[in-house]
Amino acid sequence: MLKDYKVIILDEIHERHLTCDILLGVVKCLVQHRTDLKVILMSATINIQLFARYFHNCPVVQVPGRLFPITVQHIPVPKEELRSKSGRLSPAPYVRLLNLVDHKYPSSERGDLLIFLSGTAEISAVQEAAQQYADKNGNWIILPLHSTLALADQDKVFDYAPEKVRKCILSTNIAETSVTIDGCHMQKLKEFWISRASAEQ
C-alpha cells in the first residue's frame, strides 16, 4: 500500500492513456484505504470537474497562467498528398503549411512554427522537403528536435531567428512535455490519436 510514501504526484494527467487511467483507478483505491496519503494531480488543460468528482469532490487548486488566443484551422489534405502505398509519410502537406504561413502572415510578424511528428524517420522526410522550400524562399530555418540529437543541436531551437525569418521546428513529443520553446506561435499536431485536452495544450 505504498506505506513509505506520503505524497503521490501525477503530472500531465489530461493525456488519458490506458496506463494513466489504470494508474488513476489504482490511486483512487489507495486513497480510500490510506487517509493520510496526499495525491496531487497536475495538468495545464485538465477537465477539473471530471477529475474532482472522480476523486470524491476533492479540493482544487488553480494556478493562473498566461492565456493566448488560439485559432484552430482544419486544412484538408488532398488525396495525392496522403501516405504512399509504401506507408511513407508525404512531406507535401507540411511544405504547404510553410507556404500558407508565408502568405497569411507578413514576414515582419514574429512567430515560429512547431510541428509534431511521430519519430526521426518522419522528421527526416519532412526536414528534407522543408529545407528545399526554405532554400528557395529564404525566410525559414528548419530545425529537427528529438532525444537522439546532440545537446548542442537540440539547443538550436532556443536561438532567436533573425528578423523576417521564422523557425520551423520538427519535433517528436519531446517539445510537448520536456521543453518550452519561446516564440512558437503556430503548432501542428500530427500522426497519432490523442485526447482533446492533450491537443488543446
Image (cartoon, grey):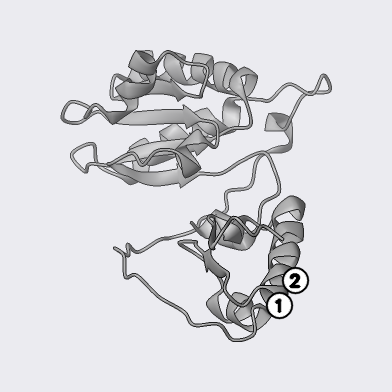
Element type at mark 2: helix
75 or 35: nearer the viewer: 35
Q: Residue at position x 59%, y 27% from top?
A: 92
The correct choice, above or below, for 6 with respect to 112 in the image is below
**Residue 149: image x %, image y %?**
47, 15
Q: 53 and 31: which one is in front?
A: 31
Q: Amino acid at mark 2?
A: Cys
Does residue 23 appear to the left or right of 95 in the view shown?
Answer: right
Hey, which quadrant is residue 70 in on the image?
bottom left
Q: Is residue 139 left or right of residue 143?
A: left
Farthest residue, direction right: 85
Disc sitting over residue 139 in the figure: none
Give the spatial CA distance, label 1 vs label 2. 5 Å
Instruction: Please tell me which residue is depicted at 56% across the width and 22% down the height of the picture.
Output: 123
Point out residue 198 in the picture as x, y percentages from the top left corner.
57, 56
Identified by mark 1, the residue type is Gln
Query: Residue 179, relative to residue 83: is it above or below?
Result: below
Question: Mark 2 sits on what residue?
Answer: 29
Which element type, helix, strand or loop, lies under badge 1? helix
| Residue bearing mark 1 | 32
Residue 180 versus residue 19 in the image, above or below:
above
